[in-house]
Image (cartoon, rainbow, N blue to C red):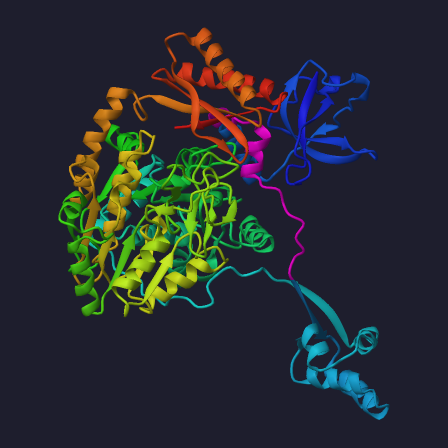
Amino acid sequence: MYADIVIDISHESLDRPFQYRIPESLVGQVQPGMWVLVPFGRRNTQKKGFVLKLGTKANIDPDRIKELTEIISDDNSSDKIRIALAVWMYREYGGNLIQSLRVVMPARKNVRPKQVSFLVRTSDEKRFLDYLDIARKKNWKGRVRLMEALLCRDYISSAFARQQLKIASDAIKALEEEKLIQIETKRFYRSVLPKESANLEKKQLNEEQQAIVDKLISSYQAGVRTPALLYGITGSGKTEVYMHLIEWMIRQNKQVIVLIPEISLTYQVILNFYSRFGEQVSMINSRLSDGERSDQLERARNGEISIMVGPRSALFTPFSNLGLIIVDEEQEGAYNSEQIPRYHTRETADKLAQLTNSLLLLGSATPSIESFSKAESGEYRKFCLTKRAVLGSCLPNVQVVDMRKELASGNRSVFSRELREKMEECLAKKQQMMLFINRRGFSRVVSCRSCGKPIECPHCDVALTEHLGDKLVCHYCGYTKAMPRSCPLCGSPYLAGFGLGTQKAEMMIKAQFPSARVLRMDMDTTSKKDGHEQILDSFRRREADILVGTQMIVKGHDFPGVTLVGILAADMSLYNCDFRSSERTFQLLTQAAGRAGRGMEPGNVIIQTYDPENYSIQTAANQDYESFYHQEIRFRRRMQYPPIGWMCEVMAVSAEEKLANQWIWQVQLLINKRFCDIIKIIGPSDAPIARLKDMWRKHLYIRSSDHKAYLEAMELIQEITEQAAVQKVSIFVTVC
C-alpha cells in the first residue's frame, strides 16, 4: 500500500507529491487528509507531510520507495479546516489537489522578520553610577555617553546608540560584560495601515439597518448559520450594517473576514475600519511586499488581529475562531479566480462558513442572479435596505441618451449635448463629476485605411491598443511596440486609431473644459504601489473636478461632492460572447449611477447608448433590480443556464494548435460516449481569443440539469487532464 504525500506544504520549492510505502502496522489507519511524519532527502530528515491519496501501484522502483514513519496529530484547527476546504475546491473546480492546497495555504516566503534591538539598563543605580565615575576618570568617552543617555531612561534603541550617540560596538560589549546593560530584541510587524485614521464618528443606524442587525445577531445566537443576502440600493448604508455586526462579533471574541472585489477599494474601506477598530484590523492584497504580507498572516495566525480586509485571497486568512465572513459587492467578476483552481469566492466562502460554523453575509445593490435566485428560493435569507442612509439623500435622476439621434443631428463628439450641458452646470457650481468608460488607452484599435487590417499582437489574436506616447500595447500579454509609420502588411502610410479609451477621453475633456482639473484612473495610472490611494485621496480632498476612469472608479466609492456621473459608452459590455453580458451591463450601469448624489445635493446621471431600448439599460436607468432579475431569469430558464442548470467551460491549451484541437475533441468524444444526452455539449471551437501569449486555445462548454452527472463529468475531465499533461497540453475547467 502506498501514499502520495505533499512534503511541508508551506515550502514553495516542494510543489509535487512524493510516494511512500505505508508500513503494515499503519495500513488501514493512514487516510487522505492526515498529517504524517516521513523521511525526506539524502539524510532522511523527518519532515511533516500531508496525505493526498492512497494506491496499490508503485510509480517508481518499489525498492527506492521509503517508508512513512508515523501518523502525527496536529492541533492547528485552522490548518485542518483549510485543508478540508482545499479538498472541496479540488473536487468542485478541478485542477489537482496540490494547486488547491497552494491557494488556501500559500507557500511562506523566506522573509526575515523585522526586529529592533534595545540596550536595556540592568544594574541598580548605585553600581551604575560608580562605574560611570570610573569611566569618566579613565576617559572612556563612548561608555560615558551611553551611560549618561541611560541615566534618564531605562533603555534606548541600538540604532540610536550607534547613529546618534556614535557608540562603537566595543563600548556596548564592555558594558554588557560588566552586566550593566543587556541587549534585547523585539519583533515588529510591518504596518500596512493608513498613517492617520479618518476620525469618522460612529453613525446611528436607521430603523431598517437596526432591524437587520438585530435579526442577524439574534439568529446567530440561536445557532442559525443560513447564509444571508443584504440587498440594498446604492448608498443605503450596507457598510454601517457590517460595522455593527463586526463590533458585536469582536465582543464575542470572534474573528471576521471582509472581502472586497477591487484593490482600488482597499484604501477607503481600511480607512473606515481603522477609524472604528484601530489595530484590530489589517489588510492583505497583491500590492503588499512579501514581508508585509507575511507579517499580516503571522498576526492573524497568532490571534493579534480580529478583522482581515482584502480581495479574494483574504478568504484564506488563518483565523482560528472565525465567526463572520462578509463578501461585499458579491456580484463582482473579480471574485472569480483566473488561476487554477478557478474557484468562485462566493461559493468557496459558503463552504468555509460551513466548515467553521460561521455566518456568511453577502452584500450588494445588484446581486448576482445566482444569489438572488437562492434568496428567492429560501436557500439564503434576504434582508433589504430600501432607502439611502444619509437623511435627505435620494437616488439620482437618470437620463438615457440615444447616441444614434446625436449622430443624426450632426453631433460627432463623444459627449452628447445633454452631458455637455450638465458638465458645464456642474463645473459652474464647483461640484464634482465622474465620467466612466470601461476601456483604457487612447484608441481601441489601430487599423490601415487602405487594406483595412488592424495591427495585431504577434503573440495573441487581438488588436493592439493605442496609448499616448506613440506606442501600441497588448492588454493581454503586455507586448509593446512603437507606432509604425506605415502598415506592416501593405505599406500604406494611412494608419488611424478607432474607438475610445480613457486616455482619449481625458484629452477630449481637457480640450472641451480647459479650466477643469481632471484626474484619470485606470490600470496605467495605478500601476505603482500607492497609485489607487493617491488618486482617490486627491479626488476626495476636492483637488480635482472630474475623475475619468474604467470600472474601478464606479464600485463602492463614496464621494459626497459628486453630483454628476456620465457613462460614455453603455453598450461596451452588452454584446460580449457571454450569457452574463446583460447582467454585467446592468450591474455596471447601476453601480456607476449610484455614485451620484450621495450627499445632500441631488445627483444626475447621463447614460449614453446606441441601444436605449435594451432591458438591462432601461432597468438600470430606473434602478429597478427586481424587474431586471425577472426578465433575465426567464432567459436563463429557457436556455438552462446557471443558476437553473450547471455549466462549465473546458479549455485545451498548447503551444501546438494540432495538439490543442486533438485533446478538446477527445474531451467531447468521451463525455458524449459516457453521458449521451444527459450532458449537453456546445463546441468544440476556437476560444474567443484563439491564441494568447503564443499558446493555442480551444474550448467547449458542458451543460446539464443533472448535478450528479455534471460532477461525474468533471471527474472524467480530471482523468483526461492528467493524460493530456504528458503531451504538455493543459486542460482547464472554469465553472460558469
Residue range of the region highlighted in magenta in the rendering: 90-114
Query: Considering the image in quadrants, where does the C terminus appear?
Result: top left
- What residue is drawn where x is 22% and y is 47%? 233
| Res 267 → quadrant | bottom left
Q: Is residue 378 above or below residue 723?
A: below
- 3 or 332: which is nearer to us? 332
> The N terminus appears in which quarter of the rendering?
top right
Q: Residue pushed farthest bottom?
A: 137
**Of all residues shown, which one is farthest toward the right?**
138
Give how far across and how far down residue 98 sits, in percent: 60, 31
Q: Residue at x 47, y 43 (%)?
A: 474
* Residue at image coords 44%, 41%: 455
Say whether residue 470 is left or right of residue 565: right
Reply above or below: 258 against 548.
above
Q: Nearer the viewer, residue 699 or 28?
A: 699
Comparing 646 with 321, the one in front is: 646
Counting labels gives 0
User: Could you say where residue 285 lies in the image, as x and y percent from the top left?
Assistant: 49, 50
